[in-house]
Amino acid sequence: MNRKAVISPPVITPSEVPAGAFMLSGGLAARGIEAPIHDLSLGFFRWLFLEHAPEAGYTNCLPSIEYLISPETEFYNPHKHRSVCGVLQSVLKSYSRKFPGWHLSLMDSIPPGVAHSPSTLIALARGGSTPFSGYLNRWIERTRGTFDHALISLAYLSQLPAAVETAWLLEQAGIRVTVGGSLVSALRDTGRGVELLNGCFREIAFDDGRSLTGVDEPFLSKVEWPVFAEKWNYFSSRPVIPFPLTTGCTWNRCLFCPDRNKPFMNVPVDNLKKVLAGAPDNPVVHLIDSAVPVNTIHELLPLFKEKTSGFYGFARPQGDWLRGNLLHDMAESGCLMLQTGAESGSSGILQRYMKGFSPDTAQRVIASVSQAGIRNYVYLLFGLPGETEDDRMQTLELVRKLKGKIDYMNLSIFNLPEKCELTDRAEEFGIEPGEYDSDAPVLRFYRPFHSLDGSEPRTESRDFLKQVFRPDPAVGPILKATPRWFRAGHMALMEKQGLYR
């Protein structure tokens, strides 16, 4: 027999099905191959909060989870949301104390020892005393005999510690394991240390899934609603369905994008119709594109209006969004939130790094999104090579001009990718890439760098954010309203400016 199962290891925030596992199982289902999804991250958190916590005498998590699944009103109240997430985090903190050196959150798992060291993870997995061991052993005992081939889908480094242990336990039980997903592909294409994974996993697949079908066609050319091993019981008030309209990026010119060579493809829109035909009632679609394509959105608005209770996704703040009544039509069709990568208020920075839009255009897009009644989640990036205090102040000024129009904000400090055009042209941009520890057998996606002119934009940006940006009256309320946990999926379902939509 060759019964397959798609496995998503802990830790991923348990508010929606992991996108990689969902698309893998859905693509196999569209080709007549049944491979049920086992979301072990959701399973782990439900076990910890609802079974282990009462046994161990931790704070009662049930009221918090009941609120996340069924808030008192149509949308989450920000204050209440912070409170219930605080309860869950406190339980995670208490649980982590049982495992010296481990740090767990709703979004991450950090093991003791050298960060991102596969050899360390192997030793921990075979020791059988990680935070995941109790749950994983129970899960294998319960599901043993239901599948012969486990397809482990890895998207984030936060999953790697549990993934190594999951693969080890499955193989000990006589089950074949193949590991793939965006994390392993990214390590091969844009990172360093992918060969170290060979010590963790016997079989690694780097393709998009087509090697499992025997047909050489883009895997996402066919997708339908997948099979789930367990009932849908995520910590969210509505089912959130991840779906890409494209692979790659419609722009694909940013100098520090590590995925510049990723092929671009439009995913057939009929696939989304097939997925929604099998979805639970009242779904919200999470468009997981690097940049949502404007033309495709036009085409899909009737479907969103008829078949969903909302949608959201990431957009480049370019002028296309301002044409005609698009944003108004999106709001009417259920658009809950637009995530925009404004990145900087400095036209010089945006031009230098080939972002393809200006601060003025970004300002107009964000203002128009707010005027249409759609939530704004704005990404800002600091610490790029050559960034000056004036550049940073221009970013602050952009936020000041948009006061009252930005609902949530993500502040990031620039990391230099191991492989990207900026790294290749480092001297031209006044930097010299370095090494954290060239002899350490670890996985890496980024490199340290120093500026040839002696400036330290990352350090200077951290100081600026702490001393100037965060305390500003235009910024503070936005950061306070931005949930620390559950992030985008719950942000789209949060009260907007105290009103229900």
Image: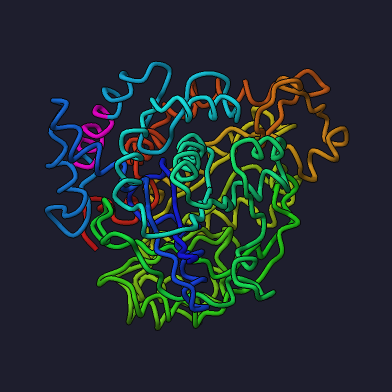
Q: Which of 129 and 468 is in front in this view?
A: 129
Residue 90 lies in the magenta-colored region: yes
| Residue 9: quadrant of the picture | top left
Q: Do we see residue 368 in this rendering? A: no
Residue at 41%, 22% in the rendered image: 102
| Residue 215: quadrant of the picture | bottom right
Q: Position of residue 456 (x, y in %)?
A: 70, 21
Quadrant of the drawing holding the C terminus: bottom left
Q: Please report the bounds of the magenta region as a residue range.
A: 80-91
Residue 251 lies in the magenta-colored region: no
Residue 313 relative to residue 486: left or right: right
Q: Which of 265 and 493 is in front in this view?
A: 265
Residue 105 relative to residue 82: left or right: right
Q: Do we see residue 307 in this rendering? A: yes
Residue at 59%, 52% in the rendered image: 180
Q: Is the magenta stretch mostly helix, strand or loop?
A: helix
Residue at 65%, 42% in the rendered image: 346
Residue at 56%, 55% in the rendered image: 362
Q: Where is residue 115 in the image (x, y as percent from the top left)?
A: 57, 24
Q: Nearer the viewer, residue 394 or 99?
A: 99
Q: How many labels does the image show?
A: 0
Q: Is residue 27 above or below residue 168?
A: below
Q: Position of residue 328 (x, y in %)?
A: 40, 73
